[in-house]
Image: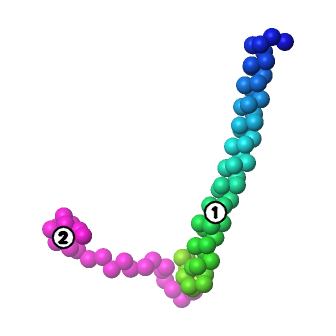
Amino acid sequence: MNGREFLRGMRNGMKLFGDNITIIVNTIVLTIVYFFGIGITALIARLAGKKFIDKSINKRTKTYWKELGLKRRPLDDHYRQS
């Protein structure tokens, strides 16, 4: 085995090692972000009684669309919104 084959094998081995480490680190980081970001938000929302999606079904309701209450405003109101 000459030096070129050794370096080629070492490069392939390092690439495989890097790919495996990447999978492990990404899994750990994304799990932490999920549990702290999504989990804590969901827990606080549940404790506060916040419902993000209304899942109740009422057979007497004709539509589930909600009125936004938008009304026509003068054009000048759109230029300086603050």
Give the image location of residue 31, x and y in percent. Answer: 68, 59
Q: Residue at x 64, y 70 (%)?
A: 39
Q: Residues within 10 Å of mark 1 (few under 14, many from 20)?
A: few
User: Residue at position x 78%, y 22% from top?
Assistant: 9
- Name the residue that disc number 2 marks: 77
| Above or below, comparing residue 15 to residue 32 in the picture | above
Callout 1 amino acid: Tyr
| Rendered residue at 43%/79% (across/down) | 66
Q: What is the spatial separation of the Cα atoms under label 2 and label 1, in whole angstroms? A: 41 Å
Q: Is residue 13 above or below residue 73?
A: above
Circle 2 — which element?
helix
Measuring from the top left, give residue 70's x and y in whole percent.
30, 76
Check residue 80 for magenta coloring: yes
Image height of 61 relative to 21, above or below: below
Instruction: Report the magenta stretch's main SS.
Output: loop
Q: Give neighbour class at mark 2: few <14, some 14-19, many 20+ (Cα, 10 Å).
A: few
Q: From what the image shows, is residue 42 above or below residue 80? A: below
As rendered, which of 24 and 45 lies closer to the eye? Answer: 24
Report if residue 63 lies within the magenta region: yes
Residue 44 at least partly seen: yes
Q: Label 2 amino acid? A: Asp
Q: Which residue is mark 1?
A: 34
The picture quadrant where one finds residue 22 is top right
Q: Is residue 34 left or right of residue 70?
A: right
Q: Is residue 57 visible?
A: no
Q: Which residues are magenta?
A: 58-82
**Contact? badges 2 and 1 (CB < 8 Å):** no
Q: Position of residue 68 (x, y in %)?
A: 37, 77
